[in-house]
Amino acid sequence: MKIGPVELSCPEGAVTLAFEVYEEDGELICGVLDLKGNFDRGTLVTAARREMKTLEALARKAGCAEMRVAGRNWARVLNDYQPLPGGKPNRLRKRLT
């Protein structure tokens, strides 16, 4: 099920994101499909980490076992995410359970 776009506003700026929830190997996965924002560069990392924590909590509450992001290399921003196996670059995941 695709959800979004959803606009999130915070003191540092605003972001619009679209995500989907799907089943894989009997588990629900929440995957970020698109993320566009307008942030002050100096606050991007802090704001992105905080807003992803919010999305992770919502996904966990909905029964998702894992978060996934792809596209841009978010590894330095989302430093608690791990590379997704399979050899494709810029794909990260975080277990929620």
Image (tube, rainbow, N blue to C red):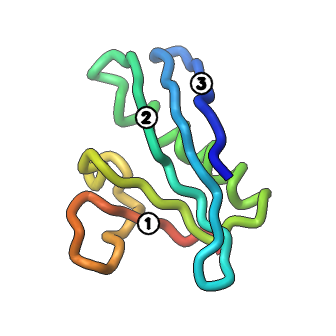
Q: Residue at x 23, y 68 (%)?
A: 88
Specify the amino acid type for callout 1.
Answer: Arg
Q: Is residue 17 left or right of residue 29?
A: left
Camera-nearest residue between 16 and 46: 16
**What's the distance in space between the residues labelled 2 and 1, CA to CA?**
16 Å
- The residue wearing badge 2 is 35
Q: Residue at x 54, y 38 (%)?
A: 18
Disc number placed over residue 93 in the picture, else none: 1
- The residue wearing badge 3 is 8
Q: Earlier in the sequence, mark 3 or mark 1?
A: 3
Q: Is residue 74 left or right of residue 52?
A: left
Disc number placed over residue 69 in the picture, else none: none
How dense is the environment of label 2, judged by Cα within 10 Å: few (below 14), some, or many (20 and up)? some
Residue pushed farthest bottom? 25
Specify the amino acid type for callout 2.
Answer: Leu
Q: Earlier in the sequence, mark 2 or mark 1?
A: 2
Find residue 82 and report its horizontal and vertical position in percent.
Answer: 36, 69
Residue pushed farthest front? 1
Find residue 62 and report its horizontal and vertical position in percent.
Answer: 78, 58
How dense is the environment of label 1, judged by Cα within 10 Å: few (below 14), some, or many (20 and up)? many
Is 3 drawn above or below residue 24 in the view shown?
A: above
> SS class of the residue under badge 1?
strand
Is 1 drawn above or below residue 41 in the view shown?
A: below
Specify the amino acid type for callout 3.
Answer: Leu
Q: Is residue 45 left or right of residue 14?
A: left
Residue 40 placement: quadrant: top left
Q: Confirm or deny contact between disc 3 and disc 1 (CB under 8 A).
A: no
**What's the distance in space between the residues labelled 3 and 2, CA to CA?**
11 Å
How dense is the environment of label 3, judged by Cα within 10 Å: few (below 14), some, or many (20 and up)? few
> SS class of the residue under badge 2?
strand
Is 44 drawn above or below residue 79 in the view shown?
A: above
Q: Residue at x 37, y 18 (%)?
A: 39
